[in-house]
Image (cartoon, rainbow, N blue to C red):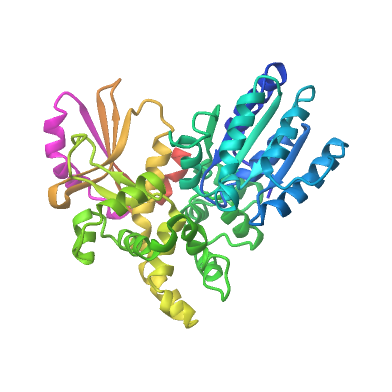
């Protein structure tokens, strides 16, 4: 798959590199969930520049440094005398290399030094502080364990706190990029766009696999996922076990409950029969896996809120794969396939709402876009979009089958909202799969 959709990030990286050429060194951190394309972005950015790439593999520090030393010597044409057993010794040489020669230094999976030798971070900090204004190196530190990268660069107790000049959080592709990929191979339809969005959420690695396997329709994608030894079956564990550590079982259980509709803290605690506030906070703040959703117009500190899994693929994985893990481990794939296909239509509706919210956010006239409900989940409204300039609020009901939208019922559910925003004009619409193209 060719390179797509990172023009904004490339512009930022190129601007920083130019500043390094004309001035002094800079650190940029690239982070985001695994499979999101951080390394691909770094390589695309550096491909026409002098650059050196290191991968921090899980090895003893002396062995890792020996491999990095060989790569440095091939890059620089210089021989380093003696063994290098500690990464900071090599890092110092890398800074000196940039005194007269601007270049890009990419250090991938930088968080792994926390397990190899965490004193590396304080040593790197001292060397960087010593050489930053003398070198012209643009350092890219890449990390895919989000919580660790936040700790390394944004925890005030850590030595590299405040040393990053820019932290770029790489996000999934937007729906219009998914459309471009399908267009380029002549396979675009609105149904296929939604199928790719529904399962992948725009994660490049998943889209690459779907493209390679020529899986464009939802039934084919589900069949691919449920093949024996499929890449996708163990993906949720592969992504999150390192993040969660030994308590992953508790976190996985919470995420399964959220994926199946238990989205309030009280609903989750009724199953656990104990407080889960600390776990929910870590899932939201430290691990960036879930987010709070509050109804539009609610008080900032109000308790009327729900949780949802941010990542579409993880939402699907916990809802259909982890929930049925016993069946999958016993290779009863046909039964799991039937269970998915039985529920997929109902499951898809909230994801179609999410897609339309994402598409509507492209409209700069909307200041607030979200959902609405009242206590005990009464009067739920799928999309509330507020145009403060025109004093207008657009309400949308989203259905997979648009014919089932009842606008009169939508107006009735909006009565309290209209009272709260009595100086606004309200509009009402139904949205279905056929309306995707008008918003792309």
Residue 138 position within the rendered picture, expressed as x and y whole percent measured from the top left: 67, 29
Q: In the rendered view, would you say 335 is above or below 265?
A: below
Residue 360 position within the rendered picture, expressed as x and y whole percent measured from the top left: 39, 36
In the displayed orientation, state which residue is furthest to the front.
82
In this orientation, which residue lies closer to the viewer: 20 or 134? 134
Q: What residue lies at 22% left-to-right and 66% top-to-bottom? A: 271
Horizontal side of 22 relative to 5 (left or right) equals right
Q: What residue lies at 60% left-to-right and 59% top-to-bottom? A: 210
Residue 409 position within the rendered picture, expressed as x and y whole percent measured from the top left: 17, 48
Is residue 408 part of the magenta span, yes or no? yes
Horizontal side of 271 relative to 310 (left or right) equals left
In this orientation, which residue lies closer to the viewer: 272 or 324? 272
In the displayed orientation, state which residue is furthest to the top.
22
Residue 30 in which image quadrant: top right
Residue 348 position within the rendered picture, expressed as x and y whole percent measured from the top left: 38, 58
Stretch of the chain drawn in magenta: 402-428
Q: In the rendered view, would you say 424 is above or below 298?
A: above
């Amino acid at each position: 798959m060719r390179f797509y959709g990172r023009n904004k990030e490339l512009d930022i990286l190129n601007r920083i590199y130019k500043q390094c050429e004309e001035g002094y060194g800079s650190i940029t951190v690239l982070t985001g969930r695994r499979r999101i394309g951080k390394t691909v972005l770094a390589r695309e950015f550096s491909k026409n520049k002098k650059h050196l790439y290191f991968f921090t593999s899980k090895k003893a520090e002396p062995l890792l440094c020996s491999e990095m030393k060989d790569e440095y010597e091939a890059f620089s044409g210089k021989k380093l005398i003696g063994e290098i057993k500690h990464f900071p010794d090599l890092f110092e040489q890398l800074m000196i290399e940039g005194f007269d020669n601007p270049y890009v230094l990419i250090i991938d999976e930088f968080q792994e030094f926390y397990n190899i030798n965490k004193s590396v971070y304080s040593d790197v900090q001292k060397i960087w502080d010593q050489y930053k204004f003398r070198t012209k190196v643009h350092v890219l530190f890449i990390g895919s364990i989000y919580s660790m990268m936040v700790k390394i660069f944004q925890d005030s107790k850590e030595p590299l706190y405040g040393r990053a000049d820019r932290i770029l959080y790489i996000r999934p592709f937007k729906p219009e990029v998914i459309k471009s990929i399908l267009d380029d191979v002549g396979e675009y339809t609105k149904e296929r766009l939604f199928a790719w969005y529904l399962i992948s959420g725009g994660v490049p690695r998943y889209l690459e696999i779907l493209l390679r396997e020529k899986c464009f329709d939802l039934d084919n994608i589900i069949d691919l996922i449920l093949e024996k030894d499929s890449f996708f079956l163990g993906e949720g564990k592969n992504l999150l076990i390192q993040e969660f550590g030994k308590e992953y079982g508790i976190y996985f259980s919470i995420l399964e409950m959220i994926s199946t509709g238990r989205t309030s803290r009280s609903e989750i605690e009724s199953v656990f029969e104990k407080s889960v506030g600390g776990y929910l906070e870590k899932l939201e703040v430290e691990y960036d896996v879930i987010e709070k959703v509050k109804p539009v117009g609610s008080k900032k500190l109000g308790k009327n809120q729900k949780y949802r899994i941010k990542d579409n693929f993880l939402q699907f994985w916990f809802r259909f794969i982890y929930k049925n893990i016993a069946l999958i481990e016993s290779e009863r794939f046909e039964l799991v396939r039937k269970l998915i296909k039985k529920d997929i239509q109902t499951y898809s509706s909230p994801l179609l709402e999410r897609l339309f919210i994402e598409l509507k956010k492209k409209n700069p006239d909307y200041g607030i876009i979200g959902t609405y409900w009242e206590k005990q989940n009464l009067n739920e409204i799928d999309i509330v979009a507020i145009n403060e300039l025109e004093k207008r609020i657009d309400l949308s009901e989203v259905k997979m089958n648009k014919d089932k939208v009842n606008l009169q019922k939508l107006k009735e559910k909006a009565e309290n909202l209209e009272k709260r925003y009595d100086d606004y004009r309200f509009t009402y619409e139904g949205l279905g799969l056929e309306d995707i193209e008008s918003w792309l």
